[in-house]
Image: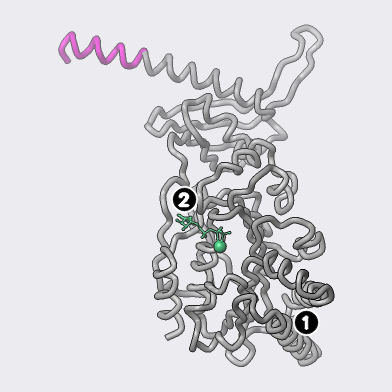
Amino acid sequence: MSVASWARHRRDRWADVALVDALVWSFREACIGAGVAQAVDAPIAGTGFRAPEITHVELGPPVRLTVRMPPGMVPAALRRAGPLVAPHLGGVALRVTDRGHGWALVDVLTVDPLADYVPLHLPRTGPAVLIGRGEDGLDITEDWRRGAHTIVQGVTRSGKSVWTYGALAQLAAQPDVLITGCDPTGLLWRPFAMSRHAGWQVSGLADLAAHEALLRRLVDEMDRRVRELPTDRDTIAVDLERPMLVVVLEEYPGLLRAVDAAEKDLGKRIRALVGRLLAEGAKVGIRVVILAQRAEAAVVGAFERAMCSLRISFRTDNRASVELLHPGTDVQVADAHTSAEPGIALMSAPGRELTRIRAPYLGGYPEYTAAIAGACA
Ligand SMILES: Nc1ncnc2c1ncn2[C@@H]1O[C@H](COP(=O)(O)OP(=O)(O)OP(=O)(O)O)[C@@H](O)[C@H]1O
Ligand SMILES: [Mg+2]
C-alpha cells in the first residue's frame, strides 16, 4: 500500500467512525422524540431515557442497523415510528425486521419502497388474489374464500377502480366464483357482457329498480343457502354449483344518492338488503366489496363497517377519513396519507397491523377489458 493510499484509507476509516457515532446519537434522540423510549427517574441522575440501542452498524448502502429494544418494547413500536425516525438518519423510511428476543434489523431506506409500479401479470394461479405489495417488498394476497367482506375508500383518482380491476380480473378466472353487483358508473361490468357473470350484474342509473331486484335476488340466494346448510355444518364450501358470490358495490354512495332522490323507501330497502348480505352472507359464500370515496356514516354505518374485515384506504382528504376505517392510526401516518400517490393505500386486515401498500397495476381500461375477456374465455 502506498503512503498516499494508506492516508486516504485512514481518512475514510475516520469518516466512517464519525458517521457511525452520528448515527448512533441521532437514532437515540429520534427514538426519544418519537416516543419509542421509556423515561426513567433516578434520584441522583434525574430523568433519563431507555431507548432502542444500536449495537452494530453496516454503512452499506443501504445503512443497516442492528438494534436491541429495551425490555418491554418490541420492534413493532419502532416500525410504527419509522416515518418520524428515518429523516434523522438521512432516509425516508425504515424497514424493520423483527429478529425475536427484542432484536431488530433496521434498514434505512433512501427512496420510498413503494415508489415503483407493481405490475399485475395475468393469469395468476391459485385462489390467492394479489391485492398489493408492502413496504417490505413482499406480495400481499387475499384468499376471498377465507376472508369476509371488503371496503375500499379514497378520493377521486386515488386508485380504487384500478385496484378493483386487478382483483376482479383474478377472481373472474376462478370457475367457482361469480362476480356480481351494482355499478352506477356503467364501466365496471361492460367487459363482462356475454360472460356467465353478466346475468348477475346491473349497470347505470337508468333503472334503479333493477339494482334493488338484483340485491333481493342475492339475499334470496343467501337465504336458500342458509336453509340448505347441513345440520352438522355452519358454513358452506363453495363449489361449481354454489359459487362464491362476490358482490361489488362500485361507487356505492352514488347509487344511494340516486335512489334516495328517486324514492325515499327505495334507499331504505337497498340499505337493508346490503346490511343483510354483510351480516349473514359470509358463512354461505357471499363476499361484499364496497367502494366509496369516503366511508362516512351516511354511506356505511358503524355496523356495516364492522362487518368488513379487509379495509383499504387510498388517498383520503383528511386524517378523520383514515380514522373511519383504521381507528387508532398514528396521527403522522394519517396526515401523510392525505398526499399519497395514486395506487398507494393503507390496509387493515385480520391478524395484520396497519400496512402501507401499493396496489398492483393491471393497466388502464383497455387492459382491464382484455383481462376480463381472457378470464371469461
Ligand atoms: N396501483 C396503481 N399504480 C399506478 N398508478 C395508479 C394505480 N392506481 C391508480 N393509478 C393511477 O391513478 C388513476 C386513477 O385511478 P382510479 O381510476 O382507480 O381512481 P378512482 O379512485 O377509481 O377514482 P374515481 O373515484 O374518480 O372513480 C389511474 O388512471 C392511474 O393512472
Ligand atoms: Mg373509480
Ligand 2 quadrant assignment: bottom right
Magenta stretch, main secondary structure, is helix
Residue shown at 57%/48% (left/top)? 356
- At which x and y percent is residue 208? 70, 79
Q: Secondary structure at mark 2?
A: loop
Vertical comparison of 133 with 130: above or below: above
- Kindly indicate the quadrant of the structure image that contains residue 228: bottom right
Q: Is residue 223 toward the left or the right of residue 206 in the image?
A: right
Foreground: 146 or 131?
A: 131
Foreground: 148 or 316?
A: 316
Q: Amino acid at mark 2?
A: Gly
- At which x and y percent is residue 114? 47, 47
Q: Which residues are magenta?
A: 1-14
N-term mark: 2 or 1: 2
10 magenta-colored: yes
Q: Is residue 298 toward the left or the right of residue 186 in the image?
A: right
Q: Is residue 179 toward the left or the right of residue 63 in the image?
A: right
Q: Which residue is mark 2?
A: 137
Q: Which residue is mark 1?
A: 234
Quarter of the image with the N terminus in it: top left
**Dots 2 and 1: beta carbons under 8 Å?**
no
Question: Around disc 2, counting alpha carbons within 10 Å, would you say few (fewer than 14), some (14 to 19), or many (20 or more)?
Answer: few
Foreground: 104 or 194?
A: 194
Q: CA distance from mark 2 to mark 1?
A: 37 Å
